[in-house]
Image (cartoon, helix red, strand yellow):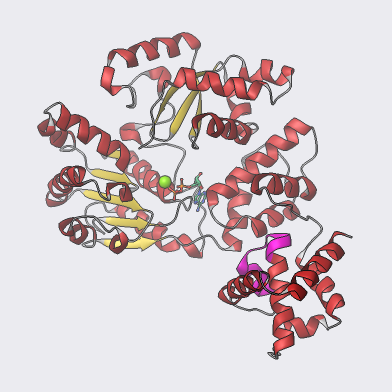
Amino acid sequence: MATVVNARSLWESVLGDLQVRVNRPSYETWLKDTHGVRQGNGELVVGTPNSFVCSMLENRMYSMIAEAVERVFGEPLDIIFKIISHENAVDNIQAQKHTSSHSNKIVGKNESLDYNVSNGGVIQKYTFDNFVLGKPNELAYAASQAVATNPGNAYNPLFIYAKVGMGKTHLLHAIGNALISSGKNIHYTTTEEFTNEYIDAIRNGKTESFRNRYRHVDTLLLDDIQFLVGKEQTQEGFFHTFNTLHLSGRQLVISSDRPPKELTLLEDRIHSRLQGGLTVDIQPPDYETRLLILKEKASKTNFVFTEDILKFLSERIYKNIRELEGTLNRLMAYSQLLNEKISVDLAARVISDTSGKRFNAKATDQKILYTVSTYFNIDEAQIIGKKRDGQTARIRQICMYLMREEAELSYSHIGTVLGGRDHTTVAHAWKKIQHLLNEDDNLRRDLINISQDLQS
Ligand code: ADP
Ligand code: MG
C-alpha cells in the first residue's frame, strides 16, 4: 500500500533535492514559492502561486521534478500542479490534521483545491477527444463509448485490461466525463482507495454507511482491481457494492493490469461477476499509434518538434504511453534547462540518460545493416532476404541483436527493416545471441568489433 506522508514535508525535501540540481535563478523563479498540498493515491498535489509558474512546472520541468519526487519518496507519484495560494494550503493542512484518520483522503470540496477534478473524482483532462485511436486500443475505445452512450445496458460490467501506461485510467475518466455531461452521478475510485475506505469503515463499525455511499451512484468506475487480489475482507465489500449496483441496473467499469482469469486469489463468485459483462484489452501501442500520440501531445506544447524527432522517439520508446509522454516532457525540460534546441541528438541523450544505457545516436538501423554486411563481407540483400543457411541466419540474428542493443529499436521495427519478419522472430534472435555470448568467444569478439565500427 502506498505510504501516506505529510505532503508539505515531502515537498520540502523534494525542493531540497531540486535546489542542488537547478541553477539559482531557475530555483528562485519557479520553485521557491511552491508548496506541498496533498499526497495520497499515487498523487502529489503541489500548490503554485500563479498560472505562469504552474504551466512552467507542468510543461517544462515535470520530468525533472518527478524524478526528484521518486528519489525522495522512493516510488513515483503523479504530480499535479495547482494554483493555490499558500494561505489556503496551510488552512487545508490544518483541516486535514483535524480529520485525523482521514488524512490520506481527498480533502472535501474546497474551491481552491479543486484541481480540475469535477464530480465524483473524475479528472477533466482525460476525455474521449484527446484519446488517440489506433489498432491496439480501438476495441477498448469503442466499448467505452458504447458504455458512455448507453450506461447500464450495453456491457455491464465493462472490464478493461492492459499493462501499465496503456490508457486504462484515461478511458475510465473519459467515460466519467461523458456521463457527467449527460447529468449522471459518477464515482471514480482506485481500488486502493476503495480498500482504504472499506477498512476504515470496518474499523469504525460503519460498514452500513459504506454500502450506502454507493447507493446513488449511476456509474462506478473502479480502477486497478488487481489490487483486490488476496484481500479477502475487501472482496466482501466489493462483492456487495457490485451486487447492489448491478442488480439495480447501474453501470460498472473496471480496469485491471491482467485479464479476469489471471486474477487468482479472487473469490470465484467475483470472477463469475466480472466475466458476466464484456472484457476488452488494450495492446501495447504500435509505431503508428505511438507517432500519432506524440504528435497530439507535442501539438499541445509551445515547443517545435520536427517529424524527425517524433519518429525517432516513436521508434525507440515502445513499451508504454506513459513512458512516451514522459520522454517528451523530459526532452522539453532538457531543452529548457540546457538552453539547447530540441533535436534528434538531444532526444538521444535524453533516452540514454533515462535508460542508463550507452546509447549510440549514430547507430541507425541502416548503418547497422551496412556495418554488419561489410564486416562479414555479405550483401545487405542477403541479410534481408530469404536465405536460411546457418551462416546467413546467424549474421541476420547478429544484425537483429545489434539493432536492439545499439539502437534500442523495437522488435517489430527491426523485423520490418529486415525483410518483414515477425517481431517474435526478432525476440528469439535476441535471446539466442544473448545466450551464445556467454559461451562463444568468437561471437563476442565479432560483436565488439562491429560495435567499434559503429562508433566511427
Ligand atoms: P494506465 O491506466 O493504463 O496505466 P493511463 O491511462 O494512466 O494508463 O495512461 C498513461 C498516460 O498516457 C496518460 O497520460 C494518458 O493520457 C496517456 N495515454 C494513454 N493512451 C492514450 C491515447 N490512446 N491517446 C492519448 N493519450 C494516451
Ligand atoms: Mg491507471
Please say if 131 is above or below 452. Answer: above
Q: Is residue 225 left or right of residue 61?
A: left
Q: Locate the N terminus by quadrant.
A: top left
> 331 or 171, which is in the foreground?
331
For the stretch drawn in magenta, what is the main secondary structure? helix
- Residue 78, placed above or below residue 81: below
- Residue 409 located within the stretch drawn in magenta: yes
* Residue range of the region highlighted in magenta in the rendering: 404-417
Q: Residue 380's spot in the image, x, y percent?
A: 81, 80
Residue 190 in view here: no
Q: Residue at x 56, y 63 (%)?
A: 286
Vertical position of residue 198 compared to residue 86: above or below: below
Q: Is 455 rendered above or below residue 393?
A: above
242 drawn magenta: no
On the image, the x and y values in percent for residue 189 come to 31, 39
Displayed quadrant of residue 423? bottom right
Q: Answer with left or right where residue 275 lies relative to residue 91.
A: left
Point out the residue furthest to the right here: 456
Q: Whole-percent x and y of residue 301?
A: 64, 38
Residue at 72% across / 67% down in the picture? 402
How many numbered marks, from 0 up?
0
Asked if residue 258 can be seen in this view, the reply is yes
Image spot of residue 270 (x, y percent) = 19, 55
Quadrant containing the C terminus in the rendered view: bottom right
- Return the residue nearer the eye: 297 or 207: 207
